[in-house]
Image: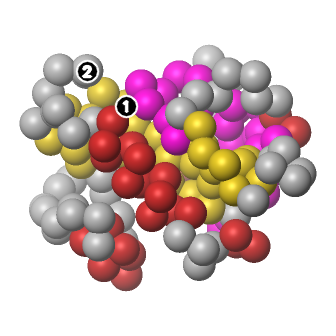
């Protein structure tokens, strides 16, 4: 059974294995935990039988008018079960009083985000791939 929670309190790095699939330089589980704890809002999906995190979504925000959703990931073995949709729906509900909630994504996943009420927009970005792993102090 999958349970959901809105806090990274009490998590250990060992519960965060297998994420950032396909990243050439993924964050370590320790850095991942720091990422979760440093987010303005987080939603987690846990497999109750194993105690491991199987999905997560994060938001950074000014708490007044805007938020950005930088990460949404579900472990490959758990994809296709509605976990990502549930995580994002829970996060958007928490952020519903903000003026704007933005994220960047590839065109192939835009239909997923459209199903929860998001719509395409044009944007710009910078990617420092040498910083992808997160490193200490990042």
Q: Nearer the viewer, residue 90 or 29?
A: 90
Q: Which residue is mark 1?
A: 60
Q: Position of residue 116 (x, y in %)?
A: 29, 64
Against 39, residue 88 (above or below) is below
User: Which residue is drawn at the image coordinates 69% and 64% (left, top)?
Assistant: 75
Q: Position of residue 108 (x, y in %)?
A: 37, 81
Mark 1: which secondary structure?
strand
- Badge 2: how crowded within 10 Å, few (<14), some, or many (20+)? few
Residue 132 in view here:
no
Could you tell me which quadrant the C terminus lies in? top right
Give, as a single range, the part of the protein colored magenta. Answer: 15-43
In front: label 2 or label 1: 2
Mark sitting on residue 63 = 2
Q: Are marks 2 and 1 in contact (CB under 8 Å)?
A: no
Q: Nearer the viewer, residue 105 or 14?
A: 14
Residue 29 in view here:
yes
User: Which residue is drawn at the image coordinates 45% and 64% (left, top)?
Assistant: 85
Q: Position of residue 35 (x, y in %)?
A: 58, 31
Mark sitting on residue 47 = none
């Amino acid at each position: 059974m999958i349970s959901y929670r809105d806090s990274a309190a009490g998590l250990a790095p060992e519960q965060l294995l297998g994420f950032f699939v396909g990243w050439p330089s993924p964050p370590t589980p320790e850095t991942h935990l720091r990422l979760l704890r440093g987010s303005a809002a987080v939603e987690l999906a846990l497999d109750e039988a194993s105690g491991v995190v199987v999905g997560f979504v994060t938001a950074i925000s000014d708490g007044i008018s805007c938020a950005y959703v930088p990460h949404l990931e579900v472990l490959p073995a758990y994809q296709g079960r509605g976990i990502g949709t549930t995580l994002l729906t829970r996060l958007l509900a928490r952020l519903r009083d903000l003026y704007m909630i933005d994220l960047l994504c590839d065109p192939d996943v835009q239909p997923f985000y459209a199903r929860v009420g998001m719509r395409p927009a044009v944007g710009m970005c910078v990617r420092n791939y040498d910083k992808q792993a997160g490193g200490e102090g990042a």
